[in-house]
Amino acid sequence: MLGFGIIIPNLAYYAEDIGATATEIALLLSIYSGMQLVFAPIWGRLSDKHGRKPAILFGLLGNAVALVAFGLAQEYIWLFTARSAAGIASAAVLPSVMAYVADVTTSEERGRGMGLMGAAMGLGFILGPAIGGVMGRHDLPFFVAGGLSLLTFLFALILLPESLQKDVAEEQHEWISPRDLFRRTTLKSPLTPLFLVAFFSTFSFAGLEATFPLFIKEGWGFGQREMGWMFMVMGAIVVPLQGGLLGRLINWIGERRIILIGLLLNALGMVFLLYAFNFVTLTIYLTIIGIGNQLIRPTNTSWISKQTQIGQGAAIGIMDAFLSLGRILGPLLGGWLYEKSAHPEFAKTGFSGVFGGWLYGNNAYSYAVLAGILVIATVCLYVPLRQVERNTQV
């Protein structure tokens, strides 16, 4: 996650240097997530059958190669290809790591374990964007991030023990196709509301992430350095919350309430962005969004791992697929709305005509649209999440 944080302030700017439009930048984010959507459930299932360590090692090595290839690319098609390969590789890592945590924690410890994982991920957001923001060149961060992924591969190869016990692996359900896996674990699963939480929370944040670098550049002249500081402040607040408080909050008020609070904080922060007027307000509103987003994922992961009947890796892989679907559709919608708002005729017709000329030149309105979708989703999921909570108590 440190490597991921390093490239955050630079990916959009590097693609823009090569000539990519806002929509093409959004496509780079979406294809990465599209590969995760397809491969995360498969990797999760493979980790249930063959162990967590092989999947983690493959993902780290593949990610290192893909990041270096991205930094070497000078044409958009090669950026697209390298980003696709990175999506396939990274799909092997996070579901397996989360399943690893589930393997080595009890049900009572699960919330704290996932919270610590979230804190470790958040720590990458503290140091990563700050490091990436001061590198000067937009291609250099990809080589550094690739090197970090390679070092992590070596660390895992030498020091990481396998967490999946052989007898547990043999007890896992029979292999089923990705199509059947989705059908059994979504259409007929009581965990569907939790998968939808993963989708909508990521959908909104990814829509923001795709255009935020361009938004602060065009609105205030800020670049990767300022964006790095914003993410560093956000991470400095989120990490203590996840590492020290989240597990206690889960045991105190329950997963459902934490998830609902996280969804509403996400929406609230995006609405506030409409009224940002300087570096401080941008940072505050981004932090509100970050707190909401980072409350949701470890809590949701912990809840799913407690309820699954198909194996930790498979269930978390399905959740990661929904996360990936959100990362596909969120940037596409966010990038399209952002790019269209720059055209005067867009303020006169279609969707924006509802709001009139106010939308023209106010690119942050795309965040208001994403916030509205998130509020509607929260209202619709309120009763289903309550039912999941009742089933948990039973």
Image: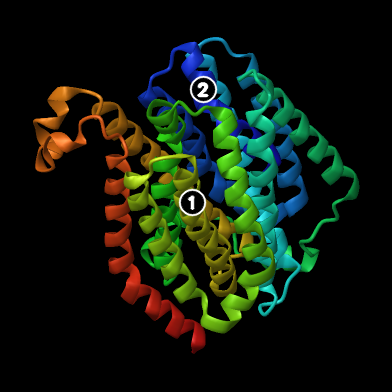
CA gap between label 2 and label 1 equals: 23 Å
Quadrant location of residue 137? top right
Viewer-side residue, 126 vs 331: 126
Q: Residue at x 39, y 60 (%)?
A: 196
How far across and how far down the image is residue 365, in percent? 27, 41
Q: From the viewer's perspective, is residue 237 above or below residue 341?
A: below
Quadrant for the N terminus, please. Answer: top right
How far across and how far down the image is residue 250, in percent? 57, 76
> Would you say 117 lies left or right of 368 here?
right
Q: From the viewer's perspective, is residue 374 above or below residue 329?
A: below
How far across and how far down the image is residue 291, in percent? 52, 58
Q: From the viewer's perspective, is residue 156 above or below residue 13?
A: below
Closer to the camera: disc 2 or disc 1?
1
Amino acid type shown at disc 1 = Ile
Q: Residues within 10 Å of mark 1 (few under 14, many from 20)?
A: some
Residue 83 seen: yes
Which residue, given by chain and number where applicable, does mark 2 sit on?
Answer: 13
> Would you say 211 lies left or right of 139 here?
left
> Would you say 335 lies left or right of 286 here?
left
Amino acid type shown at disc 2 = Tyr
Q: How is the image coloured?
A: rainbow
Q: Residue furthest bottom?
A: 394
Q: Which mark is residue 284?
A: 1
Q: Secondary structure at mark 1?
A: helix
Q: Residue furthest top?
A: 74
Q: Residue at x 32, y 76 (%)?
A: 383
Residue 170 seen: no
Q: How many marks?
A: 2
Residues under numbered marks 2 and 1 in contact, where contact means CB atoms less than 8 Å apart: no
Q: From the viewer's perspective, is residue 111 above or below residue 94?
A: below
